[in-house]
Image: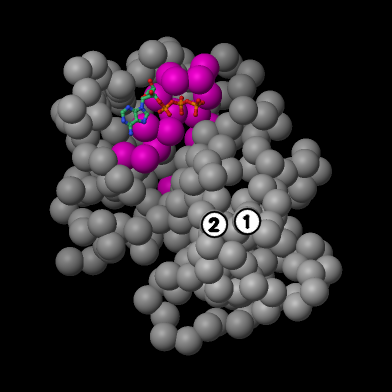
Amino acid sequence: FELFEQGEIEFRHVSFRYPDAEEAILTDINFTVHRGETVAFIGSTGSGKSTLINLVPRFYDVTEGEICIDGINIKEYTQEALHRKLGYVSQRAVMFRGSVLSNVTYGENGRQSVDEELLWKSIEIAQADDFVQDMENGYHTAVAQGGTNLSGGQKQRLAIARAIYCRPEIYIFDDSFSALDYKTDRVLRKMLKQETGTATTLIVAQRIGTIMDADKIIVLDEGKIVGIGRHKEL
Ligand code: ATP
């Protein structure tokens, strides 16, 4: 059947325990994110933010409760189908051996050939254009396995460009702007919002700017939601 088109995400009484672990990391998590909304997850280190957003691409399955996208339990989707619709950027941007360009088009969202226009747009939004132009071989510069010849912020921008290139209905950013300077961070998020206004975005954030721009903030403490609201309400 058709994969989701809206990108509305609902957590219903979700609890989660890592396999082989004794204690639950998340307990009775309930919230809904509507199409086009941006939600920022905040909370102290170890409160379960990454664990929570990692359940959406089904890196792990919930222990109790359910996660629905457009009303359908995500267990109904294969991981492969799900990943094609989700733009996920992890805490440590993953880089593959190849060129700068192949690192952005990696996965290709099932496309057979490179969509040049979308590719350049994705790179522009991700603020990756300037530093790539400055590299010795531009977009054909070789990237080592793990991206050891790139800085943390460069890797984050390429990983973000890769997610944008997939044109997902849902973006998931796990602290993926942390290595960017404040200005780049702000410009990137503004352009992304302009270009992908209808995409739903989940973002683990530390910075006040990201939090203030979110439509909704979810505060986690020891695996429980202790606050939901807008910046001025919390
Ligand atoms: P941070 O802000 O430091 O990234 P976080 O709020 O994202 O923290 P998580 O990374 O979700 O928190 O971690 C929550 C808890 O789950 C921690 O106690 C951590 O040790 C545990 N945890 C994380 N990953 C695993 C795993 N793969 N297996 C077992 N326990 C894990």
Colour pattern of the rendering = one colour
Question: Toward which corner of the image does residue 20 lie, by quadrant?
Answer: top left
- Give amino acid for label 2: Gly
What residue is pinned by disc 1? 148
- Image quadrant containing the C terminus: top right
State if disc 2 and disc 1 touch (CB < 8 Å).
Answer: yes
> For the point 63% across and 18% down, which residue is it?
232
Per the image, the residue denoted by label 2 is 146
SS assignment at label 2: helix
Q: Nearer the viewer, residue 158 or 197?
A: 158
Q: Which residue shows up at 16% across the image and 53% down it?
A: 76
In the image, taking residue 82 as reference, residue 141 lies left or right, namely right
Q: Is residue 57 above or below residue 45?
A: below
Classify residue 10 by image quadrant. Answer: top left
Instruction: Name the amino acid type tagged 1.
Output: Thr
Check mark 1 vs ligand 1: CB closer than 8 Å? yes or no. Answer: no
Q: Which residue is pictured at 59% across the width and 65% down the height?
A: 144
Ligand 1 quadrant?
Answer: top left
Residue 206 in the image: above or below residue 143: above
**Residue 138 at x, y = what percent?**
75, 75
**Distance between the Cα atoms at labels 1 and 2?**
6 Å
At x 26%, y 41%, the residue is 60
For the record, the magenta segment spans 35-55
User: Residue 165 in the image: x percent, y percent?
Assistant: 54, 68
